């Protein structure tokens, strides 16, 4: 499935690359960046709440989700940041969803997508993103390092996603200042919080840490907090919850 997603993404990346100059210009006119990393450094467990319509593993989650209304609920619950899916073919996302959501909140927003080309970084900045996701499994080591540097040039934070011990090493060598451990195996789509617990100790001090996927309850949040994570990224569970704001407060340990 990852290979199929990346095949489709390469076409989108090429289209963005063809418009790189215009995207860089548009990025320069975007609203000021909000500090994503700093939002996650505050005491306690921070929550990055995600806007997600569907996924290959879960199918339809909420096809008619209102990004603005959902984002407002997330912020009212104390979310430190938003994550917005912008991949169109497998997640039904869009950059419009990101822009609409960011316009109604004051917290930073992560572009959640499969970024393969530097033009996509500038595209994210032009759409209003404050951070981009870079997936080690989707990139060669030199590509990753280049994209981390381009993100910095665009004034964006880069959340570098890993799933194995070897990928942690690659992320650190690429200069990642934020590392997200995905508890979901991108080959099988199964989740296991033990992955996050195992890999946390390999991440150097000073790096902001995020546990991604698999947290569906307060118990899961506590496990990731106790493992030493600064933040958790929660998608499907918070989208499906009848009270997203209350659920986020519970995950943060404040309800």
Image (cartoon, rainbow, N blue to C red):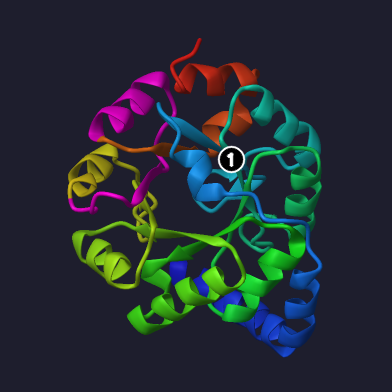
Between 158 and 84, the residue placed more toward the observer is 158
Q: Residue at x 60, y 75 (%)?
A: 8
Q: Is residue 163 above or below residue 169?
A: above
Q: Residues within 10 Å of mark 1 (few under 14, many from 20)?
A: many
Residue 129 magenta-highlighted: no
Residue 66 visible to an observer of this rendering: no
* In the image, farthest residue toward the top: 255
Image quadrant where residue 81 sits: top right
The magenta segment is 202-227
Residue 76 visible to an observer of this rendering: yes
Q: Residue at x 35, y 68 (%)?
A: 175
Whole-percent x, y for residue 185 in the image:
34, 54
Q: Is residue 101 above or below residue 186?
A: above
Between 166 and 172, the residue placed more toward the observer is 172
Between 231 and 62, the residue placed more toward the observer is 231
Whole-percent x, y for residue 59 in the image:
58, 46
In the displayed structure image, the side of residue 207 where residue 200 appears, left or right:
left
Whole-percent x, y for residue 205 in the image:
24, 49
Q: Residue at x 34, y 43 (%)?
A: 191
* In the image, farthest residue toward the bottom: 18
Name the secondary structure under disc 1: strand
Residue 221 magenta-highlighted: yes
Q: Residue at x 43, y 81 (%)?
A: 143
Residue for badge 1: 81
Q: Please tell me how many numbered marks the rendered image carries.
A: 1
Q: Is residue 176 above or below residue 150?
A: above
In the displayed structure image, the side of residue 100 where residue 80 appears, left or right:
left
In the displayed structure image, the side of residue 65 where residue 148 appears, left or right:
left
Whole-percent x, y for residue 9 in the image:
59, 74
Between 138 and 252, the residue placed more toward the observer is 252
């Amino acid at each position: 499935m990852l290979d199929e997603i990346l095949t489709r993404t390469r076409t989108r990346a090429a289209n963005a690359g063809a418009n790189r100059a215009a995207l860089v210009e548009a990025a320069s006119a975007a609203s000021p960046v909000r500090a994503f990393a700093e939002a996650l450094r505050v005491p306690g467990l921070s929550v990055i709440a995600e806007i997600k319509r569907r996924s290959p593993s879960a199918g339809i989650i909420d096809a008619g989700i209102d990004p603005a209304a959902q984002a407002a609920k997330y912020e009212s619950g104390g979310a430190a940041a938003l994550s917005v899916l912008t991949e169109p073919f497998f997640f039904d996302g869009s950059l419009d969803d990101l822009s609409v959501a960011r316009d109604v909140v004051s917290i930073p927003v992560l572009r959640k997508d499969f970024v393969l080309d530097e033009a996509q970084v500038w595209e994210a900045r032009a759409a209003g993103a404050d951070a981009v996701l870079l997936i080690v499994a989707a990139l060669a080591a030199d590509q990753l390092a280049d994209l981390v540097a381009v993100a910095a040039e665009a004034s964006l934070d880069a959340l570098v996603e890993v799933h194995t011990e070897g990928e942690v090493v690659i992320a650190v060598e690429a200069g990642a200042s934020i590392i997200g451990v995905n508890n979901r195996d991108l080959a099988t789509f199964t989740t296991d919080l033990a992955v996050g617990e195992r890999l946390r100790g390999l991440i150097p001090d000073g790096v902001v840490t995020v546990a991604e996927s698999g947290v569906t309850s307060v118990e899961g949040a506590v496990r990731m907090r106790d493992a030493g994570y600064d933040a958790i990224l929660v998608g499907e569970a918070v989208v499906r919850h009848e009270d997203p704001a209350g659920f986020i407060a519970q995950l943060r340990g404040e309800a």
